[in-house]
Image (spheres, grey):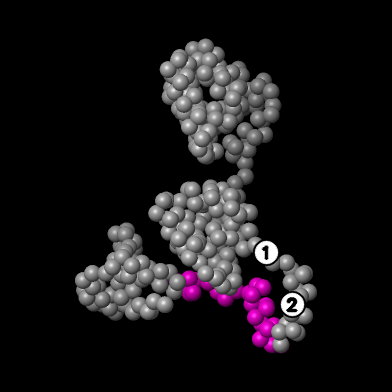
Amino acid sequence: MKDTMDSKRQAALVWLSLSPEAKQVMQDRLGDFPEEVRVLAEELNGIESASREEVKDAIDGFYETRLENRYVRHGGHAQARAFVEGAVDSEEAGRIMAPIERKAPRRKPFSSVASKLGGAKLLEFIRDEHPQTLAVILSHLPTTEQQDVMAALETDLAAEVAQRIATMDRMVPETVALVEDALNSRLQTMTKSQAEEIGGADTVASMIGGLTPEQQVAILDQFEEPLRRQIQELLLKFEDLFALEGKEFDETFTKSFTPPELALATYESPEQQDMILANLGDKATASFNEALDEYRSGRVKVKDVREKQAEIIKQARQLEQEGTISLGGDEEFL
């Protein structure tokens, strides 16, 4: 077991590891604590060098101290059993706990957070956590979600998290419960702080999206610019662009984007791929198929496909404004 590091040296090493921006924030806050500033300055002055391992130990120790101060003590299954076993003998404890455990089956840790925040949202929610916290969370997630999060982390961070998971011996249930409780509290606070959005262009587009083009025109004629244009753009979908023909099709797709970009945008639709290929030359066709094969051999993110489709829609709108193509104008919406 590692010796406990002196708190002053720990603080100094943590300070040295901070970014310039973080140091400035800390300096602003320390302005009201001159004695602490003096102590830290003395310790910094006495440090000639420190190994990478020592700095890492200082940061880990600081994190663990912060974790202890951040989380309130938690109840749950482990606390209930510990209470009962401390009050009666083991046989009686088993008799008391049996119906309690049957009535309230144990839940998989972090299932609540994972169910509310799937995929990219879950990653964004936890990615700034300490590597040890990430290790605790990931070790309790389903394999698919573990893989998605690990694949999205920076290589160095993913390696450190994986190493921490691999070297975990035994995890105290109370610690897991405390981390989960903190995440749930943060999620609840974040949800409450977000104002509920009612109405807006998105709502109107959803409402009239299933109407006929004539009905859409009649309704949109009641709106002023730029709101009218905003709703119109929301009504336009990527698949609608494939109704374009001839020169307009070429201007929108093959003249504005490379074959690999078009392969990515049409990755989900063989029909769209065929329409693109029908308008490509031999060299561009080979490039398109090569890119498509490469995408199929790896893992294509839905986010990347949607972003590329959005770029093409934006380009189509730009071409329409320039008068190069027509997406329906004032008479019809695709």
Using residue 49 as the reference point, say whether residue 85 is left or right of it. Answer: right
Task: Please state the horizontal and vertical placement of residue 276, each as a whole percent of the image.
Answer: 52, 20
Examine the image and state in which quarter residue 14 appears.
bottom left
Q: Dot 2: within a 10 Å radius of its alpha carbon, few (fewer than 14), some, or many (20 or more) residues?
A: some
Local SS, label 1: loop
Q: Main secondary structure of the magenta part?
A: helix
Q: Nearer the viewer, residue 224 or 234?
A: 234
Q: Is residue 76 a member of the stretch shown in magenta?
A: yes
Report which residue position mark 2 lands on: 97
Residue at (53% x, 33% y) in the render: 296
Q: Amino acid at mark 1?
A: Arg
- Say if residue 177 shows up in the picture: yes
Disc number for residue 107: 1
Relative height, residue 237 to residue 94 (above, below):
above
Q: Amino acid at mark 2?
A: Met
Residue at (67% x, 34% y) in the render: 207
